Image (cartoon, helix red, strand yellow):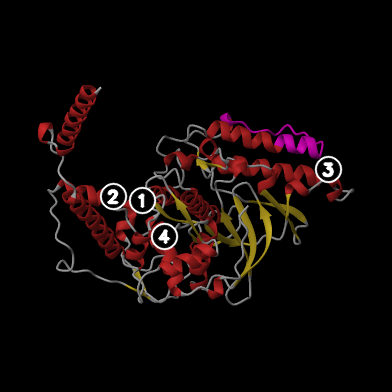
Amino acid sequence: MVKLDVSLLRYLSGEDFKVLTSVEMGMRNHELVPGTLVNSIATLRFGGCGKVLVDLTKHKLLAYERGKRYDGYRLTYAGYDYLALNALTHREILGGVGNQIGVGKESDVFICESADQQYQYAIKFHRLGRVCFRKVSEKRDFYTKSKNKTSWIYLSRIAAQREYEFLRFMHCKGMPVPKPIDCNRHVVVMELIDGRILNHYTLESFESETRDEQIAALYNKLIGLIFKFANELRVIHGDFNEFNILIKHDPVTNELEPVIIDLPQMIGVDHELAPDQFERDVNCIVEFFNKRFHYESDYVPKWSDIDEHAKEENKMDKFLLDALNAIEDDDDNNKEVKKQIDEHDVIGIKTPSSNTIHNDDDDDDDNDEHDSVDQPNKGSITTKRISSEDKPSTDLNDPREHAIVDEIDDCASQFTTMTVDPELARQRIRAEIIKKENNKKRRQAAKPKNIKGDANPVKRKRKVNQYIACEDEAAYSECF
């Protein structure tokens, strides 16, 4: 289990975050990032970053490993937490992190406070790759679609983005989910719900006089939500059980209201696994109420009860589909992000407005939602344009250049913090690759040429030694 200790965050300098971000950028196409590549991306003001790498490794924000082909550094979950918290702090979203209030097989949840210390939020850290949940490839659809299947940090980032987009969509539609505040990397900040998990409820938790009515009303609300998700919003939760349902008390109506959490595994009704996921969600609630509260009901919806729309309408909301496709095609969308962050401040890049979800039913509520969700970036952001004269000349017909371009991954992301311009980072990586190739050619040229046949010096020396040995043997036999 990864422990969150933010006491070191206040002592890290801008150079430390530059090095952490450089390792993060290098991990896009490296399992272990060499120190030379980190140095070329970070470009610290006063020279190399060896001392910074040693300090970050000492505090377990980075890990140094010896690979089969080369040695290098990789980002740990602690270092990834610090990058996300630093970005959210510069956006003036967070002011502090408190105690842990929840833990699961793929995430940790903590209490946090806003920058003005007026509100309390829930901050969720996605941590895929734990021993208890290594079969994520069989349980999560986004794992099989991802290009980088070896990095658990990358998958955690994808899961956080998906949950944030689903929260925005469900909240805009008026569904009982926590209000999303912001997202960065593998961290999602959302509204803090004052309630208890459904699994903590027993028969003694209800009032004895109205126990049966409260249990029946709660069951109907939960089953109704499952059916409403599929029939109206065209989505399936996929993990609708007693551990992902919060129950809060409404003082106005004096009723128990459910709040649904944990949404990254949601799928659309047009998915091939949608019928099985729908039946499993319904069975989880039916079996739980039967075992825990000894309650049975005739109201058990089936997949056949869902209205069959036309094929063009039998999909999720268009804005939600666009947001999810943007997450899957992140590498293509990275080319449009051309913002550079000030060298002294390491802050996050604001989510583009193209992923904003609008609600046609209530424009006023939608405007309030965007005011709270899309927080403006308070840091100084500058755009750096690189002229054609500054760019290195490249021959597009050269196959060697194509190989170099294919090896260089885009270094910008709408959910990733950066300290250098993406185009400048690509130029540095290209120069590093060309330098390595030139050094390799010089080493090969310095080696002695392998002469084949009788002219080979090694073969000639072996023949001479064999001739001398034969003469010595003949002379020795003549003496005796």
| Residue mark closest to the camera, 2 vs 3 | 2
Q: Which residues are magenta?
A: 286-304
Mark nearer the N terminus (2 vs 3): 3
Residue 376 percent coordinates (x, y): 45, 71
Q: Mark 2 is on which residue type?
A: Glu
Q: CA distance from mark 2 to mark 1?
A: 7 Å
Question: Disc 2 designates what residue?
Answer: 407
Q: Are marks 2 and 3 in contact (CB under 8 Å)?
A: no
Question: Disc 1 designates what residue?
Answer: 29
Left or right: residue 313 versus residue 384 is right
Residue 84 percent coordinates (x, y): 50, 63
Q: CA distance from mark 4 to mark 1?
A: 11 Å
Q: Mark 4 is on which residue type?
A: Val
Question: Disc 3 designates what residue?
Answer: 212
Q: Are marks 2 and 1 in contact (CB under 8 Å)?
A: yes
The circle drawn on residue 23 is: 4
Q: CA distance from mark 2 to mark 4?
A: 16 Å
- Local secondary structure at mark 4: helix
Q: CA distance from mark 3 to mark 1?
A: 58 Å
